Image (spheres, helix red, strand yellow):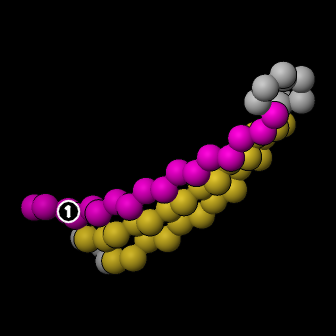
Amino acid sequence: MIAATAGGGIRLGGDHVGLTMSADAIYTRFLDHLFITNRIAGFGALVFDAEVD
């Protein structure tokens, strides 16, 4: 099995409030499997954070 992952993210905002966006892509290749030879997957997230006093 061989797998590779790549991704990135960015955060916009200040000290007390922010918005974070991230994305990842995963490629997997199975070297000795009968039916499934490769697979591509993705993951994304959008996160809002705030500090409340």
> 15 and 8: which one is in front?
8
The amino acid on which the numbered mark 1 sits, given as a three-letter code, is Glu
Badge 1, how many Cα within 10 Å: few under 14, some, many 20+?
A: few
Q: Which residue is mark 1?
A: 51
User: In the figure, residue 18 lies in which quadrant?
Assistant: bottom left
Residue 43 lies left or right of residue 26; in this view the side is: left
Dominant secondary structure, magenta: strand
Determine the residue positioned at 68% across, 46% down.
40
Where residue 17 appears, as percent x and y from the top left, is 26, 71
Quadrant where the C terminus sits is: bottom left
> 37 and 17: which one is in front?
37
Determine the residue positioned at 43% across, 71% down.
11
Q: Looking at the image, which residue sits at the far left?
A: 53
Q: Which residues are magenta?
A: 37-53
> 3 and 49: which one is in front?
3
Name above or below for residue 51 compared with residue 28.
below
Q: Magenta segment: does it hold 25?
A: no
Where residue 28 appears, as percent x and y from the top left, is 76, 40
Where residue 9 appears, as percent x and y from the top left, is 53, 66
Find numbered disc 1 in the image and state the secondary structure of the residue it sits on. Answer: loop
Name above or below for residue 14 compared with residue 33.
below
